[in-house]
Image (cartoon, coloured by chain):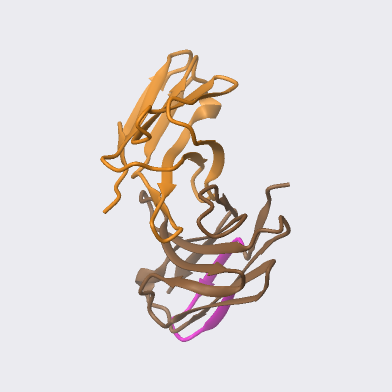
Amino acid sequence: TQLLEQSPQFLSIQEGENLTVYCNSSSVFSSLQWYRQEPGEGPVLLVTVVTGGEVKKLKRLTFQFGDARKDSSLHITAAQPGDTGLYLCAGGGSQGNLIFGKGTKLSVKP
Amino acid sequence: DTEVTQTPKHLVMGMTNKKSLKCEQHMGHRAMYWYKQKAKKPPELMFVYSYEKLSINESVPSRFSPECPNSSLLNLHLHALQPEDSALYLCASSEGPYQETQYFGPGTRLLVL
């Protein structure tokens, strides 16, 4: 069974701080996606990482895919209140579905 | 354009009602999905349509009936739902089956009384 474990589950920080969210599995994934979700809204795709060791940057967000394609991380530099939300990692399941981690709820206080 | 649209945004229904949720995408994607999301939980897969044919049904109760009229549209027909079916229902699409990058709609917030 493919599982994705995200940590931490909750994160509350002050504006300007840096943070890292982790997504780990014992299974190999061909790609991993990161989504951000606001309450009552659908997940919005942030990035897809495909190649082991890949690093992608999206403004203040840096995404990394592990060399063995079993883990990924999301690093936010100088967090802002607008970064507040639920961050979900997801990978492809054997049936073409997405397997989601349980999410990291981020709160950035001004 | 990576937009998936869903209507209605909110829906309140009684246990004897029949209603439908609608999803539309114009990205030429050939795989479409229904997910159910309860509060503080990640989305859970319900159905997958691949090239307009139902390819996966994750043991969803028959009171949920999906329909794919064409490659751009996906419906979810609801009948005799239970209060525990109250949730955020999400539609997603991808270029093809087993394409792991999926684009989600804004969801329909369903409340069953």
User: Does residue B101 appear left or right of residue B72 in this picture?
Assistant: left
Q: Is residue B61 magenta?
A: no
Q: Quadrant of residue B38?
A: bottom left
Q: Residue at x 42, y 67 (%)?
A: B86
Between A99 and A50, the one lying in front of the other is A50
Q: Quadrant of residue B77?
A: bottom right
Give the x, y percent position of residue A3.
Answer: 29, 47
Q: Residue at x 42, y 44 (%)?
A: A90
Give the x, y percent position of residue B39.
Answer: 38, 53
Between A3 and A61, the one lying in front of the other is A3
Between A109 and A91, the one lying in front of the other is A91
Report the span colored magenta: B9-20
Q: Residue at x 43, y 14 (%)?
A: A17
User: Does residue A51 appear left or right of residue A58 in this picture?
Assistant: left
The tally of labels here is: 0
Q: Which chain is brown?
A: B
Please identify which colour was used for chain A in the image: orange
Q: Does residue A11 lie above or below B26 as drawn?
A: above
Q: Does residue A86 lie above or below B24 as drawn?
A: above
Instruction: Give the quadrant of the N terminus of chain A.
Output: bottom left
Give the x, y percent position of residue B23.
Answer: 63, 65
Q: Does residue A91 lie above or below B47 as drawn?
A: above
Give the x, y percent position of residue A35.
Answer: 50, 40
